Image (tube, rainbow, N blue to C red):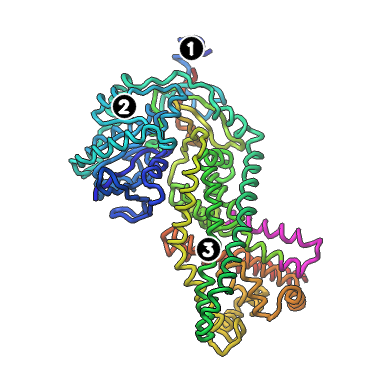
Amino acid sequence: MGESPFLYRIMPAVALSTLVPGESATIVAIHTEGPLHQRLLAMGFRTGKPIELIRRARFSGPLQVRIGTTDILLRGNEAEKIMVKKT
Amino acid sequence: MKRIALLGMPNTGKSTLFNRMTGASARVGNWPGITVELLTGRILLGGDMVEIIDLPGMYDLHGFSEDEQVVRHFLHDNVPDLALIVLNATQIERQLSLLLQLKQINLNMVVLLNMADEAKKFGITIDTAKMTEALGIPIFLLSAKYGAGYGEALQAITKALRYTTPGMAEHLRDQLKSDNQIEAEMARVLRHSVQVPARLPDNLTDQLDRLMLHPWLGLPIFFGVMYFLFQAIFFLGQPLQTGVNDLFTWLRDAAIAPLLAILPAALQGLLLDGIYNGVATVAAFVPLIVLFFLFMAIVEDTGYLSRAAFLMDALMAKMGLDGRSFVMLLMGFGCNVPALMGTRVMRSRSLRLLTMLVIPFSLCSARLQVFVFITAALFSPKAAPLVLFSLYLFSFGTAILTALLFKGYLPNSEPFVLELPPYRFPTPRQLVLRGWHEVYHFIHRASKFIVAGVVMVWLLTHLPPSAAPASADTLAGMVGAWLHPLFKPIGITSELTIALIFGFVAKEIVIGSLAVIYGLGGEALSHSLALQLDWVQAYSFMLFTLIYTPCLSAIATLRSESKDNGFTLFSVAWSLVLAWLVSFIFYQGARWLGY
């Protein structure tokens, strides 16, 4: 359904943690605060930026995501606070 | 003397540049306003000596991490004459924000876009002339690792040092504007000067990670790598350690003992068995530390340590630790001392302290020697491997228990958002410098403490002079007798208590001390032990030996790494309490069951 521009517009934002490896998305909101928020900003997390989920570690371990030229590891409960729209 | 501060995000090769600039001359030092020590080096630049300070990596000038606070406080109290801003050229889009933040506090600065070689491979082109124009700061591309562009950058640094920082770094945070403004400025600078390909070419790192981080193969490969590292460090290290020991023994017998022969016997003993043996103890660690950091630098500099964090995080997070703690814990099974020093890769202090609290429970090779001897003396050849295996289980068990008990008191404040750097080849120069710095650090920080401890135990076991060494009449014997009510419920005899006092210095000397205490050696000692102890007592003694303080060198390292006497004392006390409790439960339980 990502093909249609209309559907894309109304498609709900999902948490980054729900993506499957290989899926790309655009960051629409970052619901974090304090040190975590600062760190995410410094790592390149900004609304509007494209992000790709590269892989997940086993036993519900961390996620590896790619923003631009940077690969980042973060835990699932952190990724839950980052909302994205699949592209 | 003029001061240059190196600033930049983690993984920008800042330390590589620092090593290139200062070589082996770097030393750790204290600075006003901050509690951590920083590496500094002095070099001759344009005819003047200048001091270069390697500040911790920071993502954000108004960030909350400990390192970021250190940098802020440092800049506030020690305004550098020049700030060298090191950025990773492959991540220039993201890292420019830090540069713009730093620009706002009016420091005199030169910008170095490092890893130019990697950026080129990624197809990223950076027009430094245009960027210099847009920012009004001199900008240079270089590769700190291979040295390309270094000469040119050094000239610019020398030139920039003529004009020192105009403004003071007061009200640092007030001057910082909102992120939005920084973002608009970033876009303006990047638009004209940087071109990044829309999709990065599938590079070697991606291909390697497909294997190294494979859902099924990743963990087995990780354990394989760890096994190889362990073998490499400790099976290369042990002969070297023995060699150093032999060298010191030879030197003692051939030169020092004859030289001191004119002195009274007691003074000879103090000088030879006290001070000289203390120095030899320190020296025996040197080959191990060099090897450890040689291999650790490879693991770290190649980027594999971050992969270990990825692979092990799911399991370690439950214990309040992370994958890097796990690597150090594993290495502790060879020797606790370098493993404790290795925790420096963790930037969060509480995570580091928790890891340092856990590492001493790793059954190191010195303790293994004691266990092998005692198991051989008291257990059948069939039971011996099982006994040893059970001790490893106790080692893991006490480590996990300690982590679970204290993770609440040492909550990890650093968010787990780590960069996964591409795989890189470390250069031999980096490896050698790392080994040298660590050995220097160990000798500089820990040797006095270790020598003093060895001398103290020598005095305890040799005073008063009328008593036979290590006998019940010495101070150690008296302490043993005094502690007897405490050790009786765990089945440890007063002779063994004296051995435990020796074991405080180093586990390697426990068997030797038993030989002195019983006046027997080798086979005869084994027989005598087998006659005097039953297996329950022997196992209880081994449990206590496993869990209580690993050795004086480990305590000295704990102290020098944590820079906190309270923490060191706590670690020692906790290990003693836990050792007693575990031995008590085992001994009384076994007796109650009728053994």
Q: Same chain for the residues at labels 3 and 1, yes or no?
A: no
Rate crowding at label 3 as few (under 14), some (14 to 19) or many (20 or more) other CA atoms within 10 Å.
Answer: some
Specify whether residue A41 is in view.
Answer: no
Residue B566 place in picture, x, y as percent: 43, 64
Range of residues picked out in magenta:
B373-401
Identify the residue position indicated by label 3 in the image: B283
Task: Please tell me whether mark 1 or mark 2 is closer to you in this view.
Answer: 2
The correct choice, above or below, for B237 with respect to B322 in the image is below
Instruction: Give the labeled residue for mark 2.
Output: B183
- Circles 1 and 2, Cβ within 8 Å, touching? The answer is no
Q: Residue at x 39, y 27 (%)?
A: A46
Dominant SS type (magenta): helix
| Location of residue B251 with respect to B82 vertically, above or below | below
Foreground of the two, B278 or B195: B278
Q: Was residue B420 drawn as part of the magenta stretch in this picture?
A: no
In this picture, residue A2 sits left or right of residue B390: left
Report the side of B446 relative to B75 (left or right). Answer: right
Q: Quadrant of residue B578?
A: bottom right
Viewer-nearest residue: B18 or A49 = B18
The residue under label 1 is A7
Classify B525 as above or below B546: below
Report in which chain the residue with disc 2 lies: B
The kind of residue tagged 1 is Leu
Residue type of the residue flagged with mark 3? Ala
Dot 2: element: helix
Mark 3 and mark 2 residues within 8 Å of each other at the beta carbon: no
